[in-house]
Image: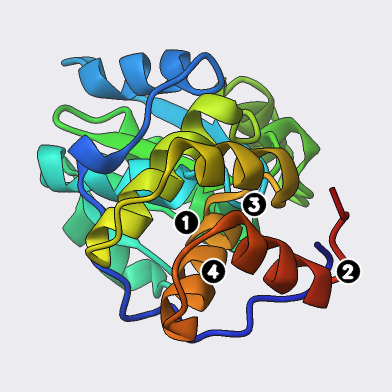
Amino acid sequence: MGRQLRLDLQSAIPQTRDDFVVSPANERAVAMLDTWPSSQGGVLALVGPEGSGKSHLASNWAERTGAEFLQDVAADLADLPSLEGRTVAIDDADRVDDETLFHLINQAHMPGGGLLLISRRRPAAWSAELPDLRSRLDAIRVIELGSPDDVVLWGVLDRFFRQRSITPSPDLLEYLVRRIERSVPHAREIVARMAADHRPPTRALARELLEQDGGEND
């Protein structure tokens, strides 16, 4: 399943916390975010491979806590004091410049603060030119999401079909779980392609679409 996503998925139905399928691949991360931050605040890193649900889980956390969710950060240091005493989440945090990240980490330890860093890699593997930042990154607590397992893939496929008013058969779900790439975006893509085809959502249709992508035969 090596192709890139071919559909515009930006208009997909918003994902809520209840939509997040919990399984052994992610239950520890879910449990920690459900109770974090405590009154002590601090910094936590949420890491995992592409399609593991990091942004989904983080955005739901930000909504619950009232956190500022920063994406594509290009912060002016003069604006950072406005985030003091607040919880903040940063997507693709390993791309943030050293000075901005250093200040945000320091602010996270102030009363009312908290910083959730989202990335595919652990902070200890990020580049850092500032020695003080390097030591802080190495000390950050990490929670990790695994690649979606069978439970997650089954759950999200079923949800994506039902959002399109399609009731998938267990046989179809089992077939897709065994064959699609193990990521939520690819699960969403194959459901969108099957729905757009307007033929009945069967194993035969799924096999045809996957074969177009170089997928395995039965």
Query: Residue at coordinates 16% horizontally, 16% vertically from top-left?
Result: 39
Which residue is located at x 31 percent, y 24 percent? 33
Type of amino acid under label 4: Glu
Residue at mark 4 to residue at mark 2: CA–CA distance: 15 Å
* Label 4 – label 1 distance at C-alpha: 22 Å
- Tag 2: amino acid: Gly
Q: CA distance from mark 2 to mark 1?
A: 32 Å
Q: Secondary structure at mark 4?
A: helix
> Please, what is the three-letter code of the amino acid marked with disc 3?
Glu
**Residue 53 % position (x, y):** 47, 44
Q: Going from the N terminus, do you reach mark 4 or mark 2 first?
A: 4
Which residue is under mark 3? 50
Q: Disc 4 marks which residue?
A: 189
Give me the C-alpha separation between circle 2 and circle 3.
21 Å
User: As drawn, is 56 to the left or to the right of 129?
Assistant: left
- What is the crowding at mark 2: few (fewer than 14 residues within 10 Å), some, or many (at least 20)? few
- For mark 2, what is the residue? 214
Q: Are marks 4 and 1 in contact (CB under 8 Å)?
A: no
- Callout 2 secondary element: loop
Viewer-proximal residue, 33 or 18?
18
Discs 3, 1 touching: Cβ within 8 Å: no
Residue 142, placed above or below residue 8: above
> Can residue 94 be seen?
yes
- Mark 4 vs mark 3: give the one in front: 4
The answer to whether marks 2 and 3 mark residues whose Cβ atoms lie closer than 8 Å is no
**10 Å crowding of disc 3: few (<14), some (14-19), many (20+):** some
Nearest the eye: 25 or 101: 25
